[in-house]
Image (cartoon, helix red, strand yellow):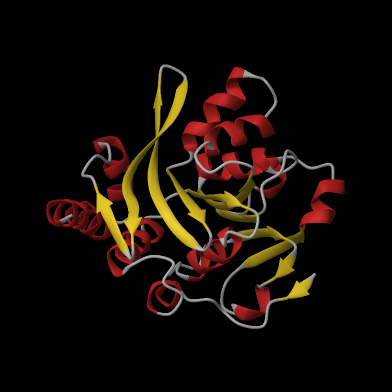
Amino acid sequence: MKQIQQRQFLHNMYFYNRMFNFEVYTLLQSMINCNSSILVHGRKGSGGDELLKTLFDAKSNSVSTLYLGPDSIKSLYPRRKIMEINSSDFDAMNVSPLDFIGSTAAVINGLTASNINLFLYMCSTGHGLASLEGETLNFALDEVAELLENSSRSMESIGTIDYVLTVEAHKLVSISEVISKDGKHTLQPFAEFVGGNEYSFYPCVTTSKIDKMRLENFEEAERFIQSIQTYSSNS
């Protein structure tokens, strides 16, 4: 595994890299602090894997985390409980999500058909972060469904993902909530890139999702919803 030499900080993504602005940064930080399960979706080379690592870096707790990817980050976080598995090794392993029941979080750098069930399992029992290199820009959930076996149980588990971040050309172009209704899953954006370094915000995150965030971190959840309401009134 290639050893990553330097941590990537979330605030640098808006301050230096300008992947998003300060308002979006505050929302992402609250989402992470509330242990939301997040999928980063974008085409190859769009910066999704980079954003994924900064989201993991922003986590403030020390839960037991399974990191699955082509590189190694464990040495950057000596105080965190991290179990690393190389992506290629995992593909050859005959394992199930229950084999990692000791982990309460998973970070998967590159979703595939062999690890999608592990990600969704962690989303339902703990929290998951993952990146998906897609072929499209606006059909993240369709591409997730393509990785799953055609079973109603597997399709229902897509609803365990809380939010989807869509990136294009190293720019975060939207943040969407995963809405599940009558067995179908759709994306409802509440922050959309409109040009320059500006975003439009919409106060449409569902009460059930806010309540879920409150159970994890009440103060951060309140900051999250109040920020959206403030930003939407100014956009």
Q: Image point 61% across, 82% down: which residue? A: 6
Residue 22, quarter of picture: bottom left
Residue 117, quarter of picture: top right
**In the image: residue 208, left or right of residue 18:** left
Q: Image point 40% across, 50% down: which residue? A: 174
- Pick out the residue farthest to the bottom: 5
Say which quadrant the C terminus sits in: bottom left
Q: Is residue 183 above or below residue 7?
A: above
The image shows residue 186 at horizontal and vertical percentages of 43, 30
Say which quadrant the N terminus sits in: bottom right
Q: Is residue 154 above or below residue 32?
A: above
**In the image: residue 133, left or right of residue 216:** right
The image shows residue 151 at horizontal and vertical percentages of 65, 19
Q: Image point 51% across, 55% down: which residue? A: 168
Q: Is residue 129 above or below residue 146?
A: below
The image shows residue 145 at horizontal and vertical percentages of 61, 30
Residue 143, quarter of picture: top right
**In the image: residue 121, left or right of residue 202:** right
